[in-house]
Image (cartoon, grey):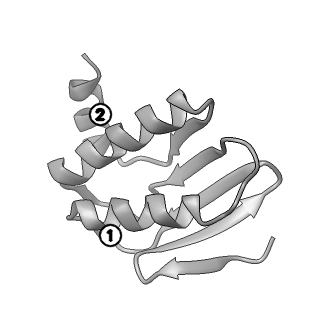
């Protein structure tokens, strides 16, 4: 259960059956950060599709490119029987998710 840094932009740890990703930086400006996130999740070597919790506590800005990558990540997890959960999202960032939900 010890956190294992995957990159300077996030911390990844397994808690039971859940892979928890905590973003370290306040801004997720590039789709590259989300690619790093996906690679960190895939490197966990789970036998079954993971439940992934993305904690946005430290995030104050999310680019549209990063949002697109999150949507793609969600679709891939769902198609493999996994689940993506987002938590502690700033209200201003949450508005972007609500707009793209339509």
Measured in 3D between alpha carbons, the distance from the residue under mark 1 to the one under mark 2, in whole angstroms, is 17 Å
Q: Give the residue pinned by disc 2.
A: 97
Label 2: element kind? helix
Categorize mark 1 by other alpha carbons within 10 Å: few (<14), some (14-19), many (20+). some
Give the residue displayed 29% in from the left and 34% down from the top: 97
Which dot marks residue 26? 1
Q: Which quadrant of the view contains residue 74?
A: top left
Viewport quadrant of the C terminus:
top left
Which is nearer the N-term, disc 1 or disc 2? 1
Q: Which quadrant of the view contains residue 71?
A: top left
Contact (CB < 8 A) between labels 1 and 2?
Answer: no
Q: Is residue 67 above or below residue 1?
A: above
Q: Where is residue 10 in the image (x, y as percent from the top left)?
A: 47, 72
97 with respect to 56 (left or right): left
Q: Is residue 14 above or below residue 1?
A: above
Give the residue displayed 72% in from the left and 49% down from the top: 18
Q: Where is residue 21 in the image (x, y as percent from the top left)?
A: 55, 61
Along the line of sight, which residue is nearer the eye, 89 or 81? Answer: 81
Which dot marks residue 72? none
Q: Where is residue 58 in the image (x, y as percent from the top left)?
A: 42, 65
């Amino acid at each position: 259960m010890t956190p294992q840094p995957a990159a300077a932009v996030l911390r990844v740890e397994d808690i039971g059956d859940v892979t928890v990703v905590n973003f370290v930086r306040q801004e997720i400006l590039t789709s590259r950060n989300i690619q790093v996130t996906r690679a960190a999740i895939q490197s966990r070597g789970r036998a079954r599709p993971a439940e992934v919790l993305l904690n946005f506590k430290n995030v104050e800005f999310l680019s549209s490119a990063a949002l697109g990558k999150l949507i793609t990540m969600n679709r891939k997890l769902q198609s493999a029987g996994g689940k993506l959960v987002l938590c502690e999202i700033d209200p201003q960032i949450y508005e972007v998710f609500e707009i793209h939900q339509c």
